[in-house]
Amino acid sequence: MKELNDKVKEMLNAELWWLGTNGDEPNVVPVGFKEIADDGTLIVGVLHLNTTLANLEKDNRIAVSVCGSKTMVGYQIKGTAKFVAEGKYADKWKEISSKMFSGKMSTRGVIEITPEKVINTTPGPKNNTEL
């Protein structure tokens, strides 16, 4: 697993994440139910994400993109992902989302993403370089 530095973690905590997957067709979606686990795994609460999950069944590779809308500082994390229906993070996001939606809907689990590469996407001379 690739360790995420403090600048990358700060950006991931502050901004929406965009998940990119590929199966029968490419798919990119923004996600807001997200966190960084203590071990550096990226966690995404699954509310809908049907195409994302279908794509991950065919190809477990994933890209997570994040960028500051004012600074244009950005990173792309590439890795592998799996859907997990139960456990510490799945249960946590089910509870959070159920409260948020007054019990009318909740996440059905989480996607756990193992970072393998971190790439600088900030415009400039270091663009497209691996951290």
Image (spheres, helix red, strand yellow):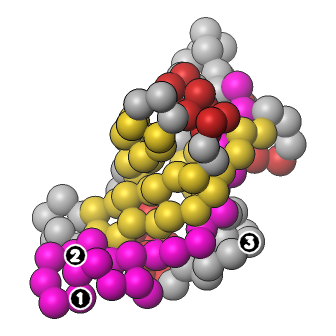
Which residue carries the number 3 mark? 39
Label 1 – label 2 distance at C-alpha: 7 Å
Q: Please, what is the three-letter code of the amino acid marked with disc 3?
A: Asp
Is disc 2 surrounded by few (<14), some (14 to 19) or many (20+) residues within 10 Å? some
Q: Amino acid at mark 1?
A: Lys
Name the residue: 59% across, 72% down.
116
Q: Is residue 16 left or right of residue 85?
A: left
Vertical order, 59 against 125 (above or below): above
- Magenta range is 108-131
Residue bearing mark 2: 122
Is 120 colored magenta in this rendering? yes
Instruction: Give the left or right position of residue 72, taking residue 118 as reference.
Output: left
* Numbered badge on residue 126: 1
Q: CA distance from mark 3 to mark 1?
A: 27 Å
Q: Nearer the viewer, mark 3 or mark 2?
A: 2
SS class of the residue under badge 3? loop
Mark 2 and mark 1 in contact (Cβ < 8 Å)?
yes
Comes first in the chain, label 3 or label 2: 3
As drawn, which residue projects farthest toward the top? Answer: 104
